[in-house]
Image: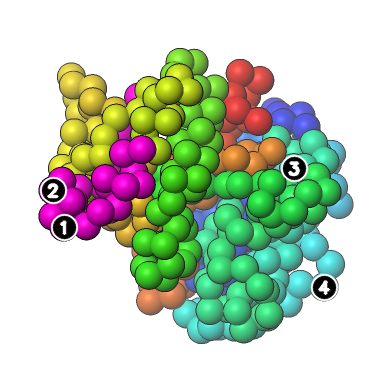
Amino acid sequence: MPESPRGAIAITQGDSAGIGPEIIAKAFLESPHALRGCFVVGELQTLRRAAAVAARACGSSMPMPVAVLQSPQQLDQVPPHCIPLLELPGLPGPAAWGRVSAEAGDAAARCVVWAAQAALRGEVAALVTAPLHKEALHAAGVDFPGHTELLQAEAARHAGVDLARMPVRMMLANDELRTVLVSIHVSLRDAIAAVTRDNLLQTLHITHEALLRSLGRAPRIGVAGLNPHAGEGGLFGREEVETIAPAIASACDQGLDVHGPFAPDTVFMRARHAPGRRGEFDVVLAMYHDQGLIPVKYLGVEKGVNVTLGLPLVRTSPDHGTAFDIAGQGVAEAASLIEAVRVARSLAAPSGPR
């Protein structure tokens, strides 16, 4: 039987023109046990189209039925071998595969807002978000570049505080490597400007608190430098000497287990866990988006999970995007989504971070 509604996990449909709905349908079809206690937040025709794609991809002649819920409390009434859907009113039907659509962007954002508000009210245990398309969000007039910023705004509004008092960070993780980013969806120029002592200390504390709860011990944090060779003592840039190293020293004085800054081209290898060998660090603090995400994604997109740290709710997502180029073809893999559900469930457990 499914878990109780309070322990349920809401999966948002993502952009209907991308692979989000079809990997959700494929996950329910291929791994129903892994998605026990989950329901989708989205639109009926979008999910039915996705179920048909997933059925063809899996060699089935019959798409998985969609069971429409009026509330999460009805989840335990859903028959076996159905996809539970909480359909939001007024959402448009599915957009054309692989096309940027303002309507699809707006619908995807509305699903995320509903799920975030439900989680903040304690009506669901966690949310797992299928991919958004940033151009579609922009076309819809959604003033956020991605999930992280949208969820931060909802959490701040719910708490009645401004954004500065709801700091969040992005962690990408798999079984081999974890990385946390100082900045997220900004230009490289702005990302470099964001490497300040205060931002670094804040990121280190958010990382420490989140992993302390999930690991049950203080994490050992390795810090990547910003410049080649971590600045080579100031020869290739002064940020390591003037900003990063002092921030690390302050964190250590405050009781955190932090080391670095290390050369960015080797610190991820040092932190990587391999069979029979633990890495030197539990997590690497990266100075900007691509520096931290490339190493994790190179190890396998299907294994990675995006976790938002610092929120008063549990949110995970696959570590890939909408993949417009393959949407509707049935070739997209559901493995990262299934892993995101597994991680969300572990984090939402009573002993996990909240």
**Is the residue under label 4 in contact with that under label 2 (CB below 8 Å)?**
no
> What residue is drawn where x is 66% and y is 51%?
164
Q: Secondary structure at mark 3?
A: helix
> What residue is drawn where x is 36% and y is 68%?
188
- Tell me if mark 1 has few (under 14), some (14-19) or many (20+) residues whose alpha carbon lies within 10 angstroms of its own: some
Q: Say how many tags the image has.
A: 4
Q: How far, Cα to Cα, is label 4 from label 1?
A: 55 Å
User: Residue type at mark 2?
Assistant: Glu
Viewer-closest of 275 and 268: 268
Write down the residue under mark 2. Answer: 232
User: Residue type at mark 1?
Assistant: Phe
Task: Quadrant for the C terminus, please.
Answer: top right
Closer to us: mark 4 or mark 3? 3
User: Residue type at mark 3?
Assistant: Ala
Write down the residue under mark 3. Answer: 119
User: Residue type at mark 4?
Assistant: Gly
**Region in magenta:** 219-246
| Residue 11 shows up from this direction | yes
Above or below, 59 against 225 in this view is below
Closer to us: mark 2 or mark 4? 2
Q: How far, Cα to Cα, is label 3 from label 1?
A: 46 Å
Write down the residue under mark 4. Answer: 90
Q: Point out residue 112 in the picture as x, y percentages from the top left corner.
A: 68, 58
Write down the residue under mark 1. Answer: 236
Q: Point out residue 181 in the picture as x, y percentages from the top left corner.
A: 42, 49
Closer to us: mark 3 or mark 2? 2
Q: Earlier in the sequence, mark 4 or mark 1?
A: 4
Q: Point out residue 145 in the picture as x, y percentages from the top left corner.
A: 56, 68
